[in-house]
Image (tube, rainbow, N blue to C red):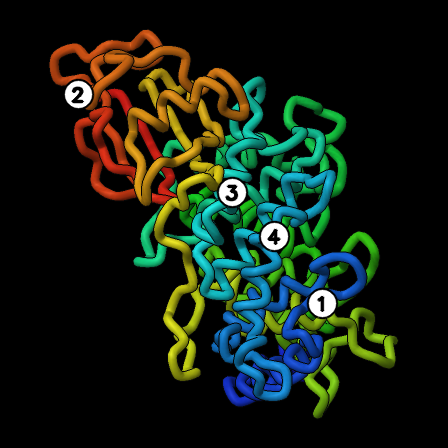
Amino acid sequence: MAAGALLLSAVPAHATASPSQIATSKSTGVTYLKSLQAADGSYVTGGGLSNEWAFSALAAAGTASADVTPGGDTSKNARLVYRNQLAAPTWPSASPVVTDYERGILNSYAAGIDPARIGPGRNLVADLAAYWQTAEPGYYGPSANFNGTVFGLLALGGAKTQSGGQRVPQSLLNASVATVRANQHNDGGWNYSKAAGDPTALAQGSDIDMTGAAIASLCVGGVPNTDAAIVAAKNFLKGKLASSGAFNAMFGVNTDSNGWAVSGLNACGINPQGTDFTSGTGKTPLDFLIAQQFKPGGGFKYLPTDTSPSPYASVDGLRAVAGAGFTATPPAPTSAGEPAWSATTDFTTGTAAKLALVVDDGTGSLKVCAVTLAPTGTTTTLGDVLDAAATATPSGCVTSVTPATGGGTVTALNGTANSGSSTWKVGLDGAIEAAATRATTVHLGDTVSLRYGS
């Protein structure tokens, strides 16, 4: 009898999704996402770019957006059309919000478009820098919309340079990492709204979706998955796992919530099919997602009871099953003549351009802004960037520069002067720092970082 009781209570063998099932899910999922492409090559539905998250899922599943064409018409390939949409002066709208630019960064990167070099007049990284909250460092956009800060960190930490490097200084990522930490609820998760400093808000129950996005932002921001904040979030998600492998989300069991949670685990290198995420019936979150996928169509339904696929759920489901976070390194195109990256390399005389500027004086008080300048050649200089920063957004990024003219070494910035081994240094797109001189060459799309120290 005792042996029988043990057998009845034993956890069944793991029924984890197999490599074959995952491969099939990816293949059919890509087929479904390709079917969403419009005849003009776009992923536009209605009046906006609501299906643009497809680029992150396609990349995660190993498909280059430059290879996605309507009826084989390469002149309308998805990458080309998307880049033209992002470069248009009317994008994203007459009343943009910070998440428009964050979404654009994550998806243009996945599409193989350098987000800082969309065109001579479009730098999405600089567009995001303009939303830095000077009064609340670490936040992007109104702090009440905590979602904007999480996706700002995801964008800046996840969208690498063309060579695979980190394009912004770690000090900038650290500022938002601290902000995300301050908003973690007592139960280990997060919600869409700001909770930092508010005991009542911090005591409220967390959201599955936002918890997935928040842990992903911490991990792409440089936090290891052994960190206490990640472990607490992992335990929160673990406690929400249902017998089907789904997470019990705020609005019920659904593909999108599962997708966001799994993408968070993926970004942190936590196995969504490990022991912690295998239910008592042997089901994992990937089992649930794959069960939500129509066969052979490849689309995912939002709710288990739905009878037709949802484009948005299909994106979230496929990206998670494919093992990605909230963006993915773009695969190389296989179409003849398509380069690995699509980007503008030079300034265009007469076309206003933006650059992201980060100033770190060593006191822990970062200044971040978007600098708009009118280049007179294919490149510009650090001196011209610093001069133009007098009218940057937000204001106060640069208040004084010595020398004020010429091409010499920058000896003082914002009242902080070089002293002994502590001097002003400049780094471009995360490259090795060098002595800051007004003559330093700056290219289109460079993220300009100035740091004071040894």
Tell me whether circle 1 and circle 4 mark residues in contact (CB < 8 Å): no
Mark 4 or mark 2, which has the lower sequence index? 4
Front label number (2 vs 1)? 2
Q: What amino acid type should be assigned to the residue bearing mark 1?
A: Ala
Q: What amino acid type should be assigned to the residue bearing mark 4?
A: Ala
The number of discs equals 4
Front label number (1 vs 4)? 4
Q: What amino acid type should be assigned to the residue bearing mark 3?
A: Leu
The residue located at (59%, 46%) in the rendering is 101
The front one of 3 and 288 is 288
The answer to which quarter of the image holds residue 69 is bottom right
Question: Marks 3 and 1, how far apart in space?
Answer: 27 Å
Q: Which residue is mark 1?
A: 246
Tell me whether circle 2 and circle 1 mark residues in contact (CB < 8 Å): no
The numbered mark at residue 153 is 3
On screen, 116 above or below 292?
above
Q: Which residue is mark 2?
A: 408
Residue farthest along the left direction in this orientation: 420
Secondary structure type for disc 3: helix
Residue count near mark 4 (Cα–Cα under 10 Å), binned few <14, some 14–19, many ≥20: few
Direction from residue 423 to residue 200 in the image, left or right: right
Mark 1 or mark 4, which has the lower sequence index? 4
Question: Marks 2 and 1, how far apart in space?
Answer: 61 Å
Residue count near mark 1 (Cα–Cα under 10 Å), binned few <14, some 14–19, many ≥20: many
On screen, 353 above or below 63?
above
Question: Marks 4 and 3, how far apart in space?
Answer: 25 Å
Secondary structure type for disc 4: loop
Mark 4 or mark 3, which has the lower sequence index? 4
